[in-house]
Image: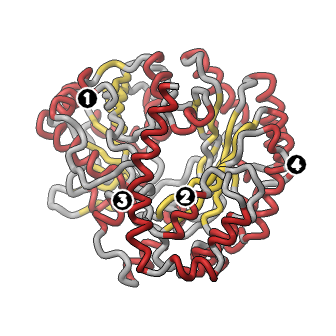
Amino acid sequence: MRVALISPYPDITAYGVRAIAAFLKANGVAVRLIFLPDPLGDALTDCPERYPAAVMEQTAALCADCDLVGVSLMTNYVDNAVQITRAVKAKTGVPVLWGGVHPTIRPEECLELADLVCVGDGEEAILDVVRAIEADGDLTTIANIQARRTDGTMARNAVRPLTQNLDALPAPDWSHEDHHIWDSQNPLAGVVPLTPAATEAILARGTVSLLLGKIGYQTMTGRGCPHRCAYCVNDAIKALYGAKGYLRWRGTDHVLAEIETVRRILPDIGYVWISDDAFFARPLADIVEFCRQWKTRIGLPFSCLGSPATISREKMDALLDAGLFYLQMGVQTGSPRIQKLFNRQAMGNEVMLAAMRIINASKDRMFPPSYDFILDTPYETTADRLESVRFIAQIPKPFRLQPFSLVLYPGTKLHAMAAADGFLTDERRQVYTKSYTMRRPDYINLLILLAKGGRMPSRLLALLASDAVAGVLVRPLFNPLWQGLFALMGPAKRLLRRVSGRA
């Protein structure tokens, strides 16, 4: 049996795809990995045909000798999955299975084109599909799998219990055995075998790798999140499984053995990016043991994400001693009213500032931390937005901001609210093809972008966000000015990059 797994994500880490590939291989299934990084990246637009026709022909040819083709997707990559699936179906008779966040939330929609949909975790379910295909068995009765029956009805099977022992699963597959890629930065090469050298070159182009000047390897030490934020699909997945047992951790040895293996394949890796939603949520004893072993077995600098309510001085000290050199934390808003809307009222401004002070106390040992903010929430008032700007003026320097325009992803509470309240009228434009970089070009967002690097004087920022000043400059009369400034920012950034590159 042979399975082709296809990833359309701009980031070739594709943790879930590689995890499923490793699990299938461990159970005797041959796996071919095909990476088709979305050429649009973060610059999403309404572009259903993402890939050249020749690339789709090569992809279909790679799938022709397979028994199953799996495509992983999130909502922003539905167009990619559609184009890939149509190409595969046009050239082969191989069944196509869609998995990932979007099929988990909207299986009926996905089954309009896919033959099968995997809901939730995919390792065991996809292995059962492979075994059923091999035995010419029934594909409509497999837990976690939804399918169309021959009579056109939909088989909605229950989800199986979550795997609690993550150490029983193999680490993601970075072997490069039968791995292939189309690199949009070298499009004429077509779909070619992926080598370790090519992987390192691609990883070096990553946003965080460029920021830090090191090649980064990304992994996860657990699955799930302790929070239920209204804008995040984690909440919908928790509802699918039940919150109990949703947050699970891998053992330290399991994680470090993965990194040791990958470093033998990719020797130029300079840091590790731990991309758990809230790594600091690990118990203190686990973090201390993780750090003890990290220093002796890995010794590389690493970065991670933390949520305000989970950051403590004890955890921070242990991680810094082990090599933590960059930290990302979600702030999202400085407005208590919007914090309640986001279901983040337990992480109010005082909690966030306390976490920031802990981080700032170690500023001489780290890169400036990044703080995430969500912009363009339809329920925000001007007063709410100005509260966020004034909160930014209180953040201890140095820091960086990562401002994201809200995308109302299906399955989230905010999506349901916005649809019911008339804010969501065109899902394709407002969700499927909207990038989080598509910020509203107005005065308040301009202030946040000007504060992004953490260099704007705090008093000046607070003044510009005061009622006296902002009350005038947010008037519609000035909108053309702010729109013009936003239009100039993109070309100015590109010019600066070219100049600095030549220097």
Given contact means CB atoms under 8 Å apart, are the residues at marks 2 and 4 in contact?
A: no
Which label's residue is closer to the chain start, 4 or 3?
4
Amino acid at circle 1? Cys
Which label's residue is closer to the chain start, 1 or 3?
1
Tell me the SS state at disc 2.
Answer: helix
Residue sticking out furthest to the left? 90
Q: Which residue is mark 4?
A: 314
As drawn, 493 above or below 112: above
In whole angstroms, how far apart are the C-alphas of marks 1 and 2? Answer: 48 Å
In whole angstroms, how far apart are the C-alphas of marks 4 and 1? Answer: 51 Å
In whole angstroms, how far apart are the C-alphas of marks 1 and 3? Answer: 34 Å
| Relative image position of residue 231 (x, y in whole percent) | 51, 67
Which label's residue is closer to the chain start, 1 or 2?
1
323, 214: nearer the viewer: 214
Total count of labels: 4
Q: Which residue is mark 3?
A: 434
In whole angstroms, how far apart are the C-alphas of marks 2 and 4? Answer: 33 Å
Which of pointers 2 and 4 indicates the residue nearer the eye? 2
Q: Residue at x 53, y 60 (%)?
A: 234
| Relative image position of residue 435 (x, y in whole percent) | 39, 56
271, 502: nearer the viewer: 502
Amino acid at circle 3? Lys
Q: Which residue is mark 1?
A: 66
Q: Residue at x 80, y 29 (%)?
A: 293
